Structure formats: structure tokens, C-alpha cells
Image (spheres, rainbow, N blue to C red):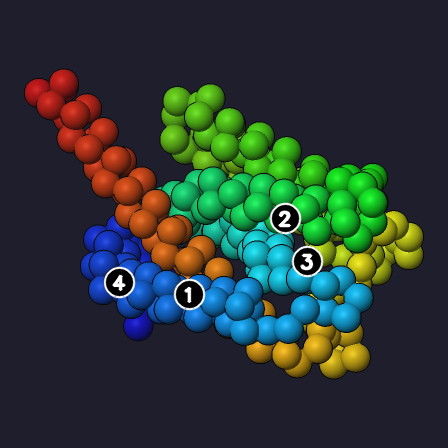
Amino acid sequence: MSIWEYANPKKFMQTSGIVLPWVAALSGLCLVTGLVWGFFLTPDDFRQGSTVKIIYLHVPSAMMAINAWAMMLVTSLIWLVRRHHVSALAAKAAAPVGLTFTVIALVTGALWGQPMWGTWWAWDPRLTSFLILTLFYLGYIALWQAIEDPDTAADLTAVLCLVGSVFAGLSRYAVLFWNQGLHQGASLSLDKEENVADVFWVPLLVCIAGFVLLFLALVLVRTRTEIRTRRLMALMARERMA
């Protein structure tokens, strides 16, 4: 069996119809467990007090904002190279979800930053690159809406996705590139010394798993809707020509 079988819309609809309820249920379980655990069953931080608990929303949403663009990059490349329509529709479906995570990250970052830094916003390298990524999301969605021909829209948005990937990468690694700014280091990393304390770390991992599954569920739902819409438009066009 080849993975490219799932580029067939019929195969994708069959498989996603089976997987989607399980992904949605696991997402709900992880989100409820992680958020209740994090907000109500962990202690206040000795320096940041109760404000530290916003990490259970801020960190997962920021991670998904960048990873959603990475997923769009992969599916856009598949479209450009192999011309599989499901991949282009999946990229289109992921954009509003990624934008939502990006806005959540910006808002929760401001709510966290104001009491810690004394300001809602600073032109910090990571924050600035994240704001630019938000604008790329908006531009990507607007470009899909502005072009009537689906294949042309898929081509141009794929190119835009390639350009925006630079800022998605900068959003992830800006702190390493520029050793300045107010933003703190990573809350999670492969280096154990950079991780938050274990009492916050475990529920944070559960929340991240919930956000990843939520993203997957929403993208599956939206991709299935895009495929159905494309089929409906094809039927309507066929009837007009009959």
C-alpha cells in the first residue's frame, strides 16, 4: 500500500471518516485533562505567581501556529510536485486553524507579558516574526478567496507558503538567532535544563497533545468540507452544461 493512495479523494473521505471521531474524542480528553490539571492542580510559580498557568494555552497554541504552517508547506510542496488536489485542499483547510492558534498565542503572550515585562507588546525578534507570520496567514487566506480558478489559487498560495516559511522558521528560532529581546527561552526542549519544572511540564505535555489532536481533527473536518464543496461545484457545472 502506498501513502499516495490517500491523495485519492474517495480513499481520503473513507479513511478520515473512520479516524476523525477517535481523533476528536482523544483531543477532548487530553484538553480537558491537561487544562484542568494545569490550571487547578498545579501550584503557583515562586516568581511569576499564578500568571505562569497561561503557558497551558500560550505554549501549545504558539507551537501549533508554527507547525500548522509547516504542515501547509509540506502539502503545498506535494501539490506543486505531484498535483494532488487533496494536498492543496488540506493546506487551504489548515490556514484558518493556524491563524486562530497564532492569534491565541499573540493574545495570551500579551496577557502574560504585561505583568512580567510591564508592557503588552515589545518589538522583540520572536514577537515581531510571529506578527509577520500572522500577516502571512491572512494573506494566504485572502489569496485563496481572491482567485476564482482553484488550480491557479493553489499554485499561487503554495508559492506564498514557501515564502512565509522563512518567517515561520524565524518565529521558532529567533531567540537563537538574536540574543536580545524580552522573550524568555523555550519552555520545552530536548535539553532538560531548559524545561519548566516537572510539576508544570507533565500537564503541559498533555495540553500540547490535546492541541495537536485538535488541529488534526479541525483540518480533517475542513478538508472533508472542501472536498464536498468541490464535488458540489463540479455537479452544478455539469448540470449547467447538460
Closest to the observer, 187 or 48? 48
**What amino acid type is highlighted by mark number 3?**
Thr
In the rendered structure, the answer to whether residue 71 lies left or right of residue 109 reads: left
Question: In terms of sequence position, does the residue under pointer 4 or pointer 2 come before the other?
Answer: 4
Give me the residue at 41% from left, 43% from top: 93
Question: In terms of sequence position, does the residue under pointer 3 or pointer 4 come before the other?
Answer: 4
For mark 2, what is the residue?
108
Element type where label 4 sits in the image: helix
Give me the residue at 48% from left, 60% from top: 211
18 shown above or below 181: below
Asked if residue 109 shows in the view, the reply is yes
**What amino acid type is highlighted by mark number 4?**
Pro
Question: In terms of sequence position, does the residue under pointer 2 or pointer 3 come before the other?
Answer: 3
Q: How many marks?
A: 4
Q: Nearer the viewer, mark 2 or mark 3?
A: 3
For mark 1, what is the residue?
32
Residue 105 % position (x, y): 62, 48
In space, the residues marked 1 and 3 are separated at their CA atoms by 19 Å
